[in-house]
């Protein structure tokens, strides 16, 4: 929180409040199968993996194997990772 505080006019408690609100909105939107675009930060997508069924009528909630969230970073984050320079120690 303190690092974010350095780059904004918000207090630590304000930042915590915004993050809690963001978490609540993300949970709600993803549970409604919505894509969430977070400007330059990136995009969150809901994803489901399921067992293949031969007929549509055989598909049930039990067919779902996994529910997850896919994160696609924004261009600035991708560039920062590319420019970071990794080395083996």
Image: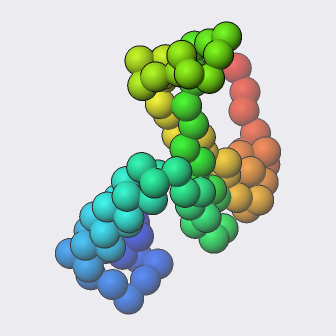
Nearer to me, 21 or 17:
21
Q: Is residue 58 visible?
A: yes
Locate residue 78 relative to residue 26 in the image: left or right: right
Determine the residue positioned at 47% across, 30% down: 67
The residue under the point 41% across, 18% down is: 62
* Residue 19, above or below 63: below
- Say above or below: 17 vs 79: below
Instruction: Identify the colour scheme used.
Output: rainbow
Q: Quadrant of the C terminus?
A: top right
* Residue that extends furthest to the front in the rendered view of this protein: 57
Residue 53, image x, y percentages:
62, 13
Q: Residue at x 55, y 31 (%)?
A: 48
Q: Position of residue 46 (x, y in %)?
A: 55, 44
Whole-percent x, y for residue 78 in the image = 74, 51
The image quarter in which residue 82 lies: top right
Q: Residue at x 45, y 59 (%)?
A: 29
Whether residue 1 is visible here, answered yes or no, is no
């Amino acid at each position: 929180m303190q690092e974010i505080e350095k780059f904004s006019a918000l207090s630590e408690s304000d930042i915590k409040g915004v993050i809690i609100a963001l978490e609540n909105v993300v949970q709600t939107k993803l549970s409604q199968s919505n894509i969430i675009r977070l400007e330059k930060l990136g995009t969150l997508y809901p994803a489901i993996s399921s067992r293949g069924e031969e007929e549509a009528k055989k598909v049930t909630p039990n067919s779902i194997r996994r529910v997850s969230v896919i994160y696609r970073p924004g261009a600035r984050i991708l560039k920062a990772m590319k420019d970071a320079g990794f080395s083996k120690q």
